């Protein structure tokens, strides 16, 4: 047995051991291969994170992009809704779109006022955090950021702590309607959803303006 092991482990008599220069070249080739594989992996990941699909909202309305892995639907009263099934919270991040008719002479500010009143009545512990003037495809609009408390598992009879939700209403005119694009996510995971939020808002060419809008609805009832 010892003779057989010695035969297997002793250097080959037909090949010279590699020189130091050859060893360095081999190490360099391995390092380059590892770096290339890492860059390839990052590229694949970034493409997956940034992948999106376009949703047509209807005649006369802008199209919108959502992450390609979000599940879409059309609940009653909405043009469209999409949810992230991979959210790190029991409250799945979501985007929804609806419209409201605008009377002659009304703008996004008027739509924001009536929507804010509705939010105070429908959402538990509603609190407006900020309101900023924006443009959407060059048209003036308002981006309202707010928070509220949700209990997403209650309807299924499950017992889980309520969730503090952070949301944004992007309100802008389109023809005779106000378009309302609402993005909502667990406040604790909002930053994790930022890439998806950017896909949605960038698809509308949303740009935040410099001046401030004074908040009108700071806190709602239960």
Image: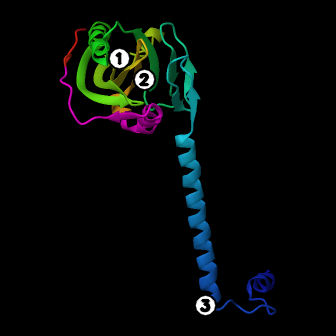
Seen from the viewer's position, the closer of residues 190 and 132 is 132
The CA span between labels 2 and 3 is: 59 Å
Relative to 16, is 53 on the left or the right? left
Q: To which quarter of the image does residue 8 belong? A: bottom right
Q: Is residue 40 above or below residue 118?
A: below
Q: Quick check: 25 left or right of 163?
A: right
Rendered location of residue 9, percent (x, y): 74, 83
Mark 2–mark 3 contact, CB under 8 Å? no
Do residues under tags 1 and 2 come within 8 Å of each other at their CB atoms? yes
Q: Is residue 211 magenta?
A: yes
Q: Which mark is residue 20?
A: 3
Q: Position of residue 34 (x, y in %)?
A: 59, 66
> Is residue 125 within the magenta segment?
no
Asked which secondary structure carries label 1, the reply is strand
Does 157 sit above or below residue 42?
above
Circle 2 sits in a helix, a strand or a loop, which is it?
A: loop
Which quadrant of the rendered structure holds the N terminus? bottom right
Which mark, residue 91? 2
Task: Please say whether residue 18 is visible from this viewpoint.
Answer: yes
> Which residue is tagged 1?
150
Q: Quadrant of residue 33?
A: bottom right
At 68% from the left and 89% from the top, the residue drawn is: 18
> As rendered, which of 172 and 46 lies closer to the eye?
172
- The answer to the question of whether label 3 and label 1 lie on touching residues, with beta carbons closer than 8 A, is no
* Callout 3 secondary element: helix
Q: Is residue 92 visible?
A: no
């Amino acid at each position: 047995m010892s003779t057989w092991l010695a035969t297997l482990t002793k250097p080959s008599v037909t090949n010279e051991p590699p020189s130091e220069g050859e060893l360095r070249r081999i190490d360099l080739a391995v390092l380059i291969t590892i770096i290339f594989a890492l860059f390839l992996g990052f590229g694949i990941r970034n493409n997956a994170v940034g992948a999106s699909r376009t949703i047509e909202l209807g005649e006369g309305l802008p199209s919108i992009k959502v992450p390609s892995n979000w599940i879409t639907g059309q609940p009653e009263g909405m043009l469209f809704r999409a949810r992230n099934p991979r959210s790190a919270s029991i409250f799945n991040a979501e985007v929804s779109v609806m419209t409201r008719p605008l009377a002659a002479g009304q703008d996004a500010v008027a739509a924001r006022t009536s929507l804010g009143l509705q939010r105070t009545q429908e959402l538990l512990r509603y609190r407006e955090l900020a309101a900023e003037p924006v443009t959407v495809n060059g048209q003036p609009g308002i981006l309202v950021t707010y928070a509220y408390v949700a209990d997403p598992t209650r309807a299924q009879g499950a017992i889980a702590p309520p969730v503090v939700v952070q949301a944004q209403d992007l309100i802008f005119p389109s023809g005779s309607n106000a378009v309302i694009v609402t993005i909502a996510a667990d406040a604790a995971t909002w930053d994790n959803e930022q890439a998806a939020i950017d896909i949605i808002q960038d698809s509308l060419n949303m740009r935040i303006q410099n001046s401030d809008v004074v908040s009108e609805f700071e806190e709602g009832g239960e």
